[in-house]
Image: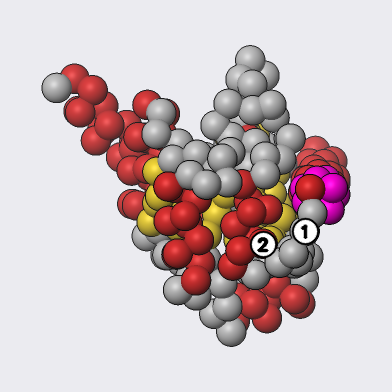
Amino acid sequence: MKRKILVWLLPLIIVWFQRLVGLTSRFRFLTNERYEDLFKNKKPFIYSIWHTNVLYSPYLHRGKNVAVLISESKDGDYINQVVHRFGNTSIRGSSSKGGSKALKAMIQHLKKGLPAAFTPDGPRGPALVLQPGIIAAAQVTQVPIIPFHYECSRQWILEKAWDKHRVPKPFTTFVVSYGEPISVPRELNEEEFEQMRLKVEEAMLNNRNRAIAEAERIRKGESK
């Protein structure tokens, strides 16, 4: 009973806090024409989001009916509630195994022309190392991958957490960065699959660095 209350109450507190921070914050979006065209034309795509960005990604994509792949862990129960309260949906399970039930459900969602989101280094890491499930999903569905990252000019970084999670502070500036869409060929041998995994991982790291650099520039401007 205590756990059921926590699963109901804690997401309410998180959602309330996120909305409060959002109302006090500014937003700087770093995007590109290819992603904008996909979004405007309601084409399916896969957001690729490092686990360090799990907290505010549902808020930043609220009301978009994004299917989020969420682990079946206890922490996943809380994330699941937050995702739904921001107008998105979820599929529970792991993307680490290409034949998993969760991955198959995610592929079906994408084939309906709806967007999805993976945390390819989750749920346990190692941080910033891309697991293969997202490549398999893009390969089967022929849906492009969109690297996504946010950093804030004022934020807490949970240094003891394995993913160094970002928690924005009130009155911050969000830097929300979208990388160029990445298409995965349908036919890949084992070596080519690994090369594609590394390509997406590098693109995600570059997109992360772009957001960090812009947030630092804003932070220096705010401190003057």
**Which residue shows up at 44% across the image and 47% down it?**
102
Q: Amino acid at mark 1?
A: Leu
Measure the C-alpha gap from mark 2 to mark 1. Answer: 8 Å
Question: Upstream in the sequence, badge 2 or badge 1?
Answer: 2
Q: Amino acid at mark 2?
A: Gln
- The answer to whether residue 14 shows anywhere in this view is no
Q: Position of residue 65 (x, y in %)?
A: 42, 65
**Which residue shows up at 70% across the image and 30% down it?**
127
Identify the image quadrant of the N terminus: top left
Would residue 197 be counted in the magenta stretch?
yes
Q: Quadrant of residue 120?
A: top right
Q: Position of residue 82 (x, y in %)?
A: 38, 44
**Which residue shows up at 67% across the image and 39% down it?**
131
Q: Position of residue 46 (x, y in %)?
A: 60, 61
**Which residue shows up at 47% across the image and 55% down it?**
104
Q: How is the image coloured?
A: secondary structure
Q: Which mark is residue 127?
A: none
Along the viewing direction, whichever of 150 and 127 lies nearer the viewer: 127
Magenta stretch, main secondary structure, is helix
Circle 2 sits on which residue?
139
Q: Are marks 2 and 1 in contact (CB under 8 Å)?
A: yes
The correct choice, above or below, for 76 with respect to 173 in the image is: above
Along the viewing direction, whichever of 125 and 4 lies nearer the viewer: 125
Q: Which mark is residue 188?
A: 1
Would residue 153 be counted in the magenta stretch?
no
Magenta stretch, residue numbers? 191-199
